[in-house]
Amino acid sequence: MRTQKIDFPDQQTPSVSPSERSHLAQAIAELGLESGYPVIVLIGGEIDEQQADVTRRAIQAISKVAEDLKAVVISGCTDIGIMAEVGQIRTRNGYKFPLVGITPEELVSWPGGPHSGKFFGWGEKRWQLEPHYSHLILVPGSQFGDEAPWIADAATLLSKEHQSVTILISGEEVSRKDIELSLEIGRPVIALSRTGRLADDLAREPERDKLITIIPANAEKRIVEAIQAALSINEKNGAGVDFRALDRNEADRAADRQMAAEI
């Protein structure tokens, strides 16, 4: 397993590159992280231009509650979309919560690493790593989505004896894979509607898994309450949270129906 420190313009970030998922616990230990955190898995992709303001405010609310709860946030760590936004918000506000980026090493570049201009056979460039993450795990993979099981496993390892939640903002098919893996292990999913793409598709579905909660991105107080509820379930006595109480109300559903009619 290769470990290194990447020198970004504003900070030096520890990075580890495990070759097998069975090495993930060791990789986390190499980064100096211990298990036993509340964990937020933040998934999605590019920020929809029409929903940019509300999306950024939602990520700000998520970052603030992560700081308040001393939670770990796990996300992809390329310098685009929600992955870039959460890193920038963390640094801009001086937050200290661990922000762990997990992405396929073959697809990314960094200062002193593979040249960003190197083209793959299908004509794509490597993506730059976002420079404001506190820890990086660069995993095997030739396409985005290969990191999904690593993210799911890392959340399980880091949240030992605590709880974890997955939050979807916008997103495409790669995010659907993340959601499926979360549901398989009983991890609740909060999808923020009105952020575009997959999140809005889920909001319009008449039926969905009971572990999926839909909350409009502009309902920041409810987002915070849902995260707090998901991360405070009493595992020892099996007490749960009725996420339906935190789900969108009839006014939200009407607004989403109107949004769908206008698309």
Image (cartoon, rainbow, N blue to C red):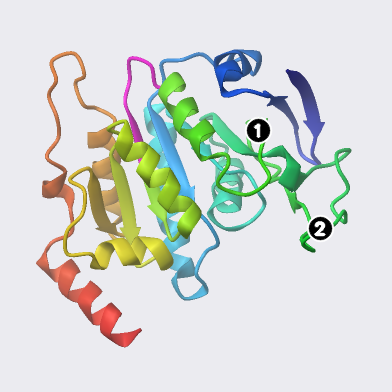
Please say if 231 is above or below 192. above
Compared with residue 194, is residue 261 higher up or lower down, i.e. above or below?
below
Q: Residue at x 45, y 21 (%)?
A: 158
Query: Is 101 a magenta residue?
Result: no
Give the residue at the far front of this rendering. Answer: 121
- Give the residue at x 23% y 50%: 213
Q: Which residues are magenta?
A: 159-166
Query: Which secondary structure lies at badge 2?
Result: loop
Identify the mark at residue 139; answer none if there is no mark.
1
Q: Which mark is residue 95?
A: none
Looking at the image, is 170 positioned above or below residue 20? below
Q: Nearer the viewer, mark 2 or mark 1?
A: 2
Q: Main secondary structure of the magenta part?
A: loop
Percent x, y for residue 260? 28, 79
> How far across and down, in percent of the image, does residue 127 sit?
73, 52
| 122 lies left or right of 161 | right
Give the side of residue 73 with respect to residue 213, left or right: right
Above or below, 163 relative to 78: above
Instruction: Give how far across and how far down residue 102 sits, in percent.
Output: 60, 36
* Local crowd size for mark 1, using a 10 Å CA cut-off: few (<14), some (14–19), many (≥20): many
The disc at residue 121 is 2
